[in-house]
Image (cartoon, rainbow, N blue to C red):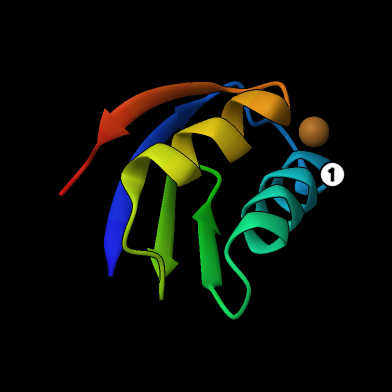
Amino acid sequence: MSTYRVDGMTCQGCVRAVSNAIQDRVPGATVDVDLAAGTVRVAGAGDPDTVRKAVEDAGFAFLGSAD
Ligand SMILES: [Cu+2]
């Protein structure tokens, strides 16, 4: 389980976009977005770089690990 800080998420649509982008690249991953905190928790993904790419491709700013 890893937690990352992601900037720019403002609504449930953003939550869905980020979640889908990560799950597309990391099949089987469980993604838990905390909108208020601006964090994304990913279970089942070992590679932070893959998560970063997914977040950026979805149009959000990846700010690194929040662990
Ligand atoms: Cu949104």
How many marks the image carries: the answer is 1
Where in the figure is residue 31, as x and y percent of width and height?
Answer: 54, 66
What x and y, as percent, mark residue 43?
Answer: 39, 73
In the displayed structure image, the side of residue 12 where residue 30 appears, left or right: left
Question: How many residues crowd around disc 1 within 10 Å: few (fewer than 14), some, or many (20 or more)?
Answer: few
Q: Position of residue 53 (x, y in %)?
A: 54, 32
- Locate the N terminus and report the quarter of the image it occupies: bottom left
Mark 1 Cβ inside 8 Å of ligand 1: yes
Q: Secondary structure at mark 1?
A: helix
| Kind of residue at disc 1 | Gly
Q: Is residue 14 above or below residue 8?
A: below
**Can residue 37 be seen at all in this image of the molecule?**
no
- Identity of the residue drawn at 54% across and 74% down: 29
Quarter of the rendering containing residue 27: bottom right
Residue 60 drawn above or below residue 38: above
Position of 58 with respect to 53 (left or right) is right
| Residue at numbered disc 1 | 13
User: Residue at 46% of width from left, 34% of height from top?
Assistant: 52
In the visual, does 19 lie left or right of 37? right
Can residue 50 be seen by looking at this rendering?
yes
Q: Which residue, as the protein is rendered here, is positioned at the far right?
A: 13
Residue 31 vs 50, above or below: the answer is below
